[in-house]
Image: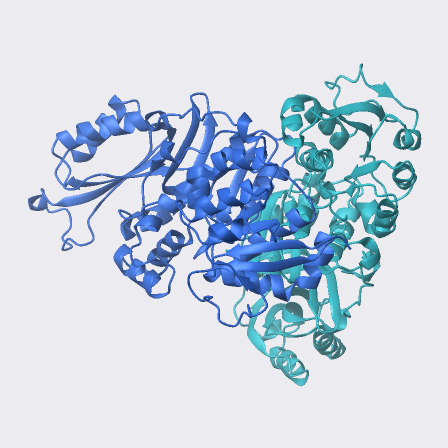
Chain colours: A blue, B cyan
């Protein structure tokens, strides 16, 4: 059997610990798959391992990840510390400069510096893989890079953040508020103490930025993403969606259209019964549409076991000598991303308005929509449930009624203009809620 | 750029034509992905191309696939003729003996001779890939071989035949009979004139046999598969399943348990709302369970575009020099499959009995189940809808009533014994219908 592949691993948190455990537990099977043994030779970690059952007594500890990355005994540096800045970035650079390969799970690093690092890796002829950076255990990067033959991808979209999907699932299932379900997610360890990164859509944005690059052959451009989080979603929205045959999911979406590449992250209505629409709880799912077919992958997007299985799969590919350009083609050949402006986004819209309940309000709203050539698939008006019941008493005029509109395909611009006019008419008691509809 | 990879392609049916089209259309992109041009140099086909828009005027025609496979000008033989016997088998052997690589979409060939061919390929150090042989465009073989790191797979199962899934979907959706929906599928080209291979479960068996081998590191053993088709499924079964929260799907299932590897193909009840349960129409879906996570892939299982995209993905991997053992590990190291006997299968069961409608029948049935230690989760009895309505008239005793049982987990053996006794009691008007329940 060939020479072993020697690893240096930095970071012993949840994913790092799980990776060490899997490398040790599956030693023989991994060697059989790779055609050579895979040996953890050295590690660096500022904290003791998260999982204290792993035995590192025979593994050399190196002082700091940068020194580990350049250590002459290793072939591949496994970066599991996280964070877009140093020491993750400097240690990955040090690894490439020493001619070592790199495997990482670091989505922030790849979203921010991935192309630059890929160029360095290719210059040094060093392998560079980051399957675990997107959607945890789902092999979506491998599928995009190697699984689709000559298909032209038109859209990649999916549920890429388990925290948000858990909260949205629980809200509808248990008829509870966003705040309540967020608190529960925090208690269960699904959400951080400061949940902004997840619920604000920023984590999803990092991931869709990486997928966009691989799918469309463009440079990663996380700054070109339109981002809305799930903070404004109410139980009323989820229930209205349910009535209309939809689920609300936080999606990352990348599509190619005439004006360029559209990248967006926002709460989205997807049909009930569609694969993405039926993904509940902390699971992730990614759909890939091409001119040849549609493909959907569903699995765990986080957690030590799932994420480390993606890390180890990358390591086995390197050990077996299977090489692929990090972004599917030479980094120097990635094109600048031509951003399709969000104002020109086209699709259906769900719009919920808290309208002042007086005669003519619905007509006013419908007219303003028509002024912008927005065709309505449906319009539903009902009094707010929180109002005392009392029939159609005209004296109650002036209270709020909920008006829910579903539009046929129109443009973002038209919707914004129509809503601005309606807001100016003074018929709304609250800011309008807008949720885009995604065709499955 | 490196030397081109030169292909010889045999078979110009739906998949062969689509493959030629994709190779021509995506020439530049494939070259960028592979790091070298991919050139179709020669072809063999006894018929003109199925798709007459492809231009083969500059491609050399070779007389017969065996000659093509050994042709000194080619590097890789692409076998798209189908069939387990010759000329597919002999031409693939000729390719290996000439030191050429092989890419094929031929499930029958792989199910029957795959391991033997893999041994020959490894002996000759020739690459050998067959992603398109299972589930068309879904990259399930790549995922099993390369995407799961060190995870220990415990079960692989899925919808692997679009014809059956189409028929079962249409029956429930349109409240039509099996025979009707089969005829429709034939008219739409989803089912063959002789549909036995699909609806009898044999096509699914070929595919699950291949997945079993890769998932569990065992030799392909299609003869060890327990097979039931969907011919006996009635609309009443689908409706009863719907009432009980299930969908009925023809699944191929491979699991590892204490007594060995269980491989089975049969109509199966899976929960509504599960990813597999919600896959409708001709789509396929495969779920992979491991100690680390569950993963589900959904996409088109057939058709020229989807299947050729898998063929081309294999070709690009070969062109890029990415090598993998055909069954994930050296063919010589695959173990003999230890067959877990079907009698010892454990799980829940749906049992529908056409019982003679007389006092005590339900009690008799329940008692015989209890005799075999089968616990019932539910028992539902109702008169046959086809009987004239007429209330509980005791004079109607002797007519048939439908009794539907759902059992808790029990063994196949116990169910068969209980049903044999019940049949002997003379309380049944028809043969019992048994559908196994699969946990998602």
Please indicate, yes or no, whether residue B189 appears anywhere in the rendered image: yes
Q: Nearer the viewer, residue B227 or B301?
A: B301
x and y, in percent, of residue A136 in the image: 50, 52
Res. A136 visible in picture: no
Which residue appears farthest toward the top when viewing the image? B57
Which residue, as the protein is rendered here, is positioned at the far bottom?
Answer: B371
Residue B335 position, x and y percent, is: 81, 62
Residue B414 quadrant: bottom right
Q: Is residue B177 left or right of residue A258?
A: right
Which residue is outermost to the left? A395
The answer to whether residue B315 is above or below residue A318 is above
Residue nearer the viewer, B284 or B387: B284
Residue B58 position within the rendered picture, expressed as x and y whole percent measured from the top left: 80, 15
Q: What is the quadrant of the N terminus of chain A in the image?
A: bottom right
**Is A194 left, or right, of A247 in this rendering?**
left
Question: B259 and B438: which one is in front?
Answer: B259
The answer to whether B306 is drawn above or below residue A83 in the figure is: above
Q: Is residue B206 left or right of residue A70?
A: right
Figure label count: 0
Residue B338 percent location from the top left of the image:
80, 67
Q: Quadrant of residue B7?
A: top right
């Amino acid at each position: 059997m060939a020479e072993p592949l020697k690893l240096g691993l930095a970071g012993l948190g949840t994913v790092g610990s799980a990776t060490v455990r899997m490398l040790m537990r599956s030693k023989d099977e991994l060697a059989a798959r790779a055609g050579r043994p895979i040996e953890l030779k050295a590690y660096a970690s500022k904290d003791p391992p998260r999982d204290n059952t792993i035995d590192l007594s025979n593994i050399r500890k190196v002082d700091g990840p940068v020194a580990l990355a350049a250590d002459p005994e290793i072939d591949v540096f496994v970066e599991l510390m996280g964070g877009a800045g140093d020491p993750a970035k400097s240690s990955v650079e040090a690894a490439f400069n020493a001619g070592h390969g790199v495997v990482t799970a670091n989505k922030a690093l790849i979203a921010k510096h991935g192309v630059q690092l890929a160029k360095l890796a290719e210059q040094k002829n060093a392998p560079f893989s980051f399957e675990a950076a997107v959607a945890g255990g789902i092999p979506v990067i491998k599928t995009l890079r190697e699984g689709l033959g000559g298909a032209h991808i038109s859209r990649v979209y999916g549920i890429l953040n388990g925290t948000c999907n858990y909260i949205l699932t629980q809200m509808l299932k248990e008829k509870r508020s966003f705040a309540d379900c967020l608190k529960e997610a925090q208690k269960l360890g699904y959400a951080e103490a400061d949940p902004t990164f997840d619920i604000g859509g920023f984590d999803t944005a990092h991931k869709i930025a990486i997928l966009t690059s691989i799918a469309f052959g463009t440079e990663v451009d996380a700054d070109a993403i339109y981002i809305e989080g799930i903070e404004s979603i109410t139980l009323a929205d989820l229930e209205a969606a349910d009535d209309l045959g939809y689920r609300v999911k936080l999606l990352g979406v990348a599509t190619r259209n005439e004006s360029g590449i559209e990248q967006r992250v926002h709460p989205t209505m997807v049909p009930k019964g569609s694969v993405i629409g039926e993904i509940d709880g902390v699971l992730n799912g990614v759909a890939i549409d091409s001119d040849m077919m549609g493909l959907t992958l569903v699995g765990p997007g986080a957690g030590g076991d799932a994420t480390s299985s993606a890390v180890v799969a990358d390591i086995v590919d390197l050990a077996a000598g299977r090489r692929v350009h990090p972004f599917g083609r030479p980094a120097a050949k990635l094109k600048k991303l031509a951003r399709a402006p969000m104002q020109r986004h086209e699709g259906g819209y769900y719009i919920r308005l808290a309208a002042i309940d007086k005669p003519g309000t619905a007509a006013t709203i419908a007219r303003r929509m028509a002024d912008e050539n927005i065709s309505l698939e449906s319009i539903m008006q009902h009094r707010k449930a929180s109002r005392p019941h009392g029939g159609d008493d005209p004296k109650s005029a002036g209270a709020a009624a909920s008006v829910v509109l579903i539009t046929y395909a129109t443009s973002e611009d038209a919707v914004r203009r129509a809503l601005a006019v309606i807001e100016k008419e003074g018929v709304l008691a609250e800011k309008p809620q807008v949720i885009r509809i995604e065709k499955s």
